[in-house]
Amino acid sequence: MCSACDSPTSARLTVRAAAGEERGSHREQREHVAALHALLVSNGLVTWTAGNISERVPGEDLFVIKGSGVDYDGLTWEGITVCDLDGVAVDGVRGPSSDTDAHAYVYRNMPEVNGQVHTHSTYAAAWAARAEPVPCVLTAMADEFGGPIPIGPFALIGDDSIGRGIVDTLAGHRSPAVFMQNHGVFTIGRSARAAVKAAVMAEDVARTVHISLQLGTPVPIPQADIDALYERYQNVYGQK
């Protein structure tokens, strides 16, 4: 759910209906995704009820996503709705996020993606407001994003336009994050947790590069070094 997107002044906004009943399907995964939302709060990525996490249901044409306007405080599995890949709720009494169509479009068109996150975190959204990619001037950026964080096109909320912009921007791109112009951050990952990590990292580097620009001109990292850093971090770093 995107609280800034729930304004009744937006003609594009559609109210997503709940499934109308709660059968408790995929409860363990819904509990997991509900718990992940606490990481958005603890990392300062969300305000009020803005933001959402979704995750694909393994082996089924379904995903789970936070309900529209549901508070983070006390968020439980019942605040997470099960949807099909057309964005239609199939289980749950909470209407799903107003970003559901965007998430659904990504899952339909990027089968490698199993998790997504959306936030309006401050520094990342500031770059989005300027429609300016974040240049790759930090080794941490090379590690996680494999280059600059790209800017996606402006798109209104309420249909799959945002999803189309995400797919068009990230197709063939190593970055798991895109800053949608005048909007905020959308991240993808092999799991919902991986997408959360990308959202946390995106805000961190957006803040650091902003501060660097206040001090002068950041020094870019040569492409060959970016490639080497990305390869090491993705395939060597950590416990395998």
Image (spheres, rainbow, N blue to C red):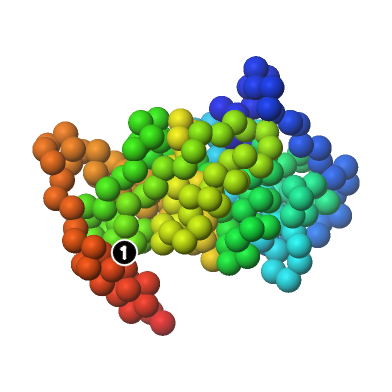
Q: Estimate the x, y position of residue 86 in percent, counting from the top left.
A: 76, 50
Q: How many marks?
A: 1
Q: Which residue shows up at 53% across the image and 50% down it?
A: 168
Q: Estimate the x, y position of residue 47 in percent, counting from the top left.
A: 49, 33
In the shown orientation, is residue 168 left or right of residue 208? Answer: right
Residue sticking out furthest to the bottom: 240
Locate the N terminus by quadrant: top right
Residue nearer the viewer, 139 or 19: 139
Residue 187 seen in the current view:
no
Q: Which residue shows up at 48% across the image and 50% down it?
A: 169
Q: Quadrant of residue 71?
A: top right
Residue sticking out furthest to the left: 216
Query: Residue at label 1?
Result: 143
Residue sticking out furthest to the top: 9
Above or below, 9 relative to 158: above
Q: Estimate the x, y position of residue 153 in percent, counting from the top left.
A: 49, 38
Residue nearer the viewer, 223 or 17: 223
Residue 17 seen in the current view:
yes
Residue nearer the viewer, 50 or 145: 145
In the shown orientation, is residue 162 left or right of residue 45? Answer: right
Q: Quadrant of residue 124?
A: top left
Q: Which residue shows up at 15% across the image and 45% down it?
A: 218
Q: Which residue shows up at 41% across the image and 42% down it?
A: 151
Locate the C terminus by quadrant: bottom left
Q: Could you tell me which secondary element the residue under label 1 belongs to?
A: helix
Instruction: Name which residue type carries label 1.
Output: Asp
- Badge 1, how many Cα within 10 Å: few under 14, some, many 20+? many
Q: Estimate the x, y position of residue 187 in percent, counting from the top left.
A: 49, 51
